[in-house]
Each structure stands twice: as structure tokens, then as C-alpha cells.
């Protein structure tokens, strides 16, 4: 889903199949995990998994050279989140209506875009690679990071 953002910017939202583990009346549709997470995604996510938000942002700022703000505003419709980059500043905006575990997923998704897709939308519009491929990469990174965290939480809660 692509929506227009002020001043001609685009914002991408996240939607997919329902989440059978969530007991919520949310308007969001939650994705199913992929059957296979590629090795590149597991390796890329390994150093980010388990870090608190502050540590994630510090490490991302060191890697990108940007001051990154993280906010949880109320976003329209089914928009999960988006990021904006301007000069040496960046902002990640995650919909506060998302359940906590999906906020984390959206954070990793947007973080991957900041880290790996630095040329931004202008580049995507001029490349032969479809935007969906960039979104798929960000999702795989987010799955690699969050599945390991969710598995750890599950194992610790059943001890």
C-alpha cells in the first residue's frame, strides 16, 4: 500500500494475512512468517536482535551518520510506519495502534531501509528492481530479528 505524504513524499504501509495469535479487534492485517529466512537476513539481523530501542538507535546512528528520532504517532488507516531522511537527520514513525510485538517488527523493517536502502525513493523509481523487492528485503530482515526475539521470549516464559 502506498499513500501520498505531505510535500509529495510517499509513505508505505504494511498489510498482509491475519495473525492467529493476536486476540485483538485491530484494523491491521498481520503477515505470516516466511517458510525460510535467507542466510543474509539472519546474519544481518544477528547483531541487532535483542537490543533495546536506545541501543538500536545508537548503533543505527553510528552506521548511517544520521541523528535518528523514533516516534509512535497515531497514523492513518492500516499504515504500519514509515521513515523520512533529510540531510543528517532521519525519523522513524511507527503507528502506536500496532500491538507491541508488531511495533518491533515495523521498527526493524524501517531500520533496514535506513541502513541498506540509503539512495531512497528517487533511486527506486529509476531502477529496474521493483519497490516490492526492497520491501521484501526489509521484511526478511525484520522477520530474522523478531522471530529470534519472540522465540527467546517464548522459551523464557515456559521455563
Image (cartoon, rainbow, N blue to C red):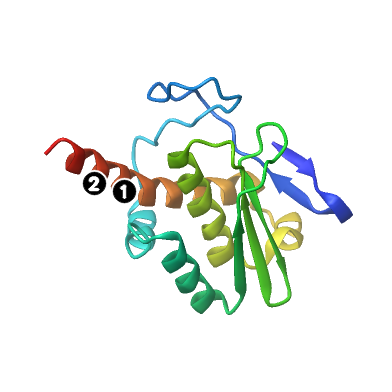
Q: Find residue 74 and report its image quarter.
A: top right
Identity of the residue furthest to the left in this view: 159
Q: Name the residue at 73% across, 76% down.
A: 87
Q: Name the residue at 53% across, 74% down.
A: 61
Tell me the CA gap for discs 1 and 2.
5 Å
Give the number of the disc on residue 17.
none
Residue 151 location, x and y as percent?
26, 42
Residue designated by label 2: 152
Q: What quarter of the picture does the N terminus occupy?
A: top right
- Mark 1–mark 2 contact, CB under 8 Å? yes
Task: State the SS at label 1.
Answer: helix
The residue nearer to you, when weighing 80 against 118, is 80
Q: Name the residue at 66% across, 47% down.
A: 73
In this rendering, the answer to whether 53 lies above or below 31 is below
Q: What quarter of the picture does the C terminus occupy?
A: top left
Residue 130 seen anywhere in this rendered image of the structure = no
Task: State the SS at label 2.
Answer: helix
Residue 158 location, x and y as percent?
15, 35
Residue 81 location, x and y as percent?
62, 46
> In screen coordinates, is 127 left or right of 99?
right
Residue 73 seen anywhere in this rendered image of the structure = yes
> In screen coordinates, is 72 left or right of 126?
left
Disc 1 crowd, CA 10 A, few/some/many (<14, 14-19, 20+): some
Residue 114 location, x and y as percent?
58, 64
Q: Name the residue at 53% across, 45% down.
A: 136
The residue nearer to you, when weighing 64 against 117, is 64
Residue designated by label 1: 149
The residue nearer to you, when weighing 157 against 32, is 157
Amino acid at each position: 500500500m502506498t499513500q501520498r505524504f505531505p510535500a509529495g513524499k510517499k509513505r508505505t504501509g504494511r498489510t498482509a494475512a491475519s495473525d492467529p495469535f493476536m486476540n485483538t479487534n485491530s484494523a491491521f492485517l498481520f503477515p505470516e512468517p516466511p517458510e525460510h529466512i535467507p542466510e543474509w537476513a539472519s546474519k544481518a539481523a544477528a547483531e541487532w536482535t535483542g537490543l533495546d530501542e536506545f541501543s538500536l538507535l545508537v548503533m543505527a546512528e553510528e552506521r548511517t551518520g544520521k541523528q535518528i528520532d523514533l516516534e509512535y504517532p497515531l497514523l492513518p488507516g492500516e499504515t504500519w510506519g514509515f521513515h523520512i531522511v533529510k540531510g543528517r537527520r532521519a525519523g522513524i514513525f511507527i503507528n502506536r495502534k500496532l500491538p507491541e510485538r508488531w511495533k518491533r517488527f515495523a521498527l526493524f523493517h524501517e531500520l533496514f531501509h535506513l541502513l541498506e536502502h540509503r539512495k531512497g525513493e528517487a533511486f527506486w523509481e529509476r531502477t529496474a528492481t521493483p519497490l516490492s523487492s526492497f520491501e521484501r528485503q526489509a521484511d526478511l530482515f525484520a522477520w530474522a530479528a523478531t522471530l529470534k526475539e519472540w522465540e527467546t521470549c517464548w522459551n523464557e516464559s515456559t521455563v
